[in-house]
Image (cartoon, helix red, strand yellow):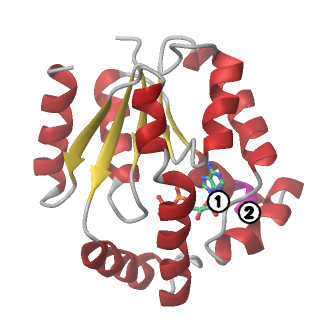
Amino acid sequence: MGRRLLFLGPPGAGKGTQATRLARAIGVPHISTGEMLRQNVADGTDLGKKAQAIMEAGDLVPDEIVVAMVDDRLARDDAACGFLLDGFPRTLAQAEALDAVMGDGAIEVALLLTADEDELVGRLLQRARDEGRADDNEETIRNRLKVYQDETAPLVEFYPEHGVPVLSVDGLGTIDEVFARVVTSLAEN
Ligand code: ADP
């Protein structure tokens, strides 16, 4: 189908789950910067060593590091026929860097997954218990939500101003229910 999509939304909204499913359904690579960074930490690469403490505090890894990582990934053959970005861009500078490298019209549609703050905190605390993710303790969670509001939420206005529709999808409900909304919303756009 060759679609070029991205997911926006706060931590805990379910981007990773829905992005994995959608990428599989439409046959494009799922490019998650969070996963790529966690893999670098697990592998003990130089990049991972730089990123680890930042991620554990719930702060953002510097734009130049993440942008270089995504540029490399998008240059691979499998991304030539479409891709689904998850967790990137996360700042206006990253969005501008993506435009600069891919040209205008690089992104067709952004999906914004929404959920209220109580729901997000509850889900992230649950994930902390289930998966033991180092960036999922209560203090870090609060910081990550603040970082989202300050740094990433402005993208919800940036994209429409740059001709990219932002489709808002309610992230509350079962995984199947939310996925059905994602598919419907994309089919209508
Ligand atoms: P979530 O979806 O729960 O917010 P991610 O798995 O997307 O978490 O990201 C985990 C962490 O990785 C972030 O809190 C941040 O430190 C780092 N990270 C991921 N993507 C980016 C990005 N585009 N820019 C800067 N830091 C990032």
Which residue is label 1 attached to?
38
Report if residue 150 is visible in the image. Answer: yes
- Would you say the beta carbon of the disc 1 residue lies within 8 angstroms of ligand 1? yes
Residue at the outermost bottom position: 138
Residue at x 66%, y 76% (from the top left corner): 56
Which residue is label 2 attached to?
41
Q: Nearer the viewer, residue 182 or 189?
A: 189
Q: Nearer the viewer, residue 88 or 43?
A: 88
Residue 16 placement (x, y as % from top left): 40, 51
Q: Are marks 1 and 2 in contact (CB under 8 Å)?
A: yes
In reply to whether residue 39 is colored magenta, the answer given is yes
Q: Nearer the viewer, residue 2 or 168?
A: 168
**Would you say 5 lies left or right of 92 here?**
left
Label 2: how many residues lie within 10 Å, few (<14), some (14-19) or many (20+)?
Answer: some
- Which kind of residue does numbered mark 2 sit on? Val
The number of discs equals 2
Residue 55 placement (x, y as % from top left): 67, 69
Quarter where residue 121 is shown: bottom left
Instruction: For ligand 1, give the image quadrant.
Output: bottom right
Secondary structure mostly taken by the magenta-highlighted segment of the chain = helix
Quarter where residue 129 is shown: bottom left
Residue 90 placement (x, y as % from top left): 57, 49
**Would you say 109 lies left or right of 87 here?**
left
Q: Which residues are magenta?
A: 38-42
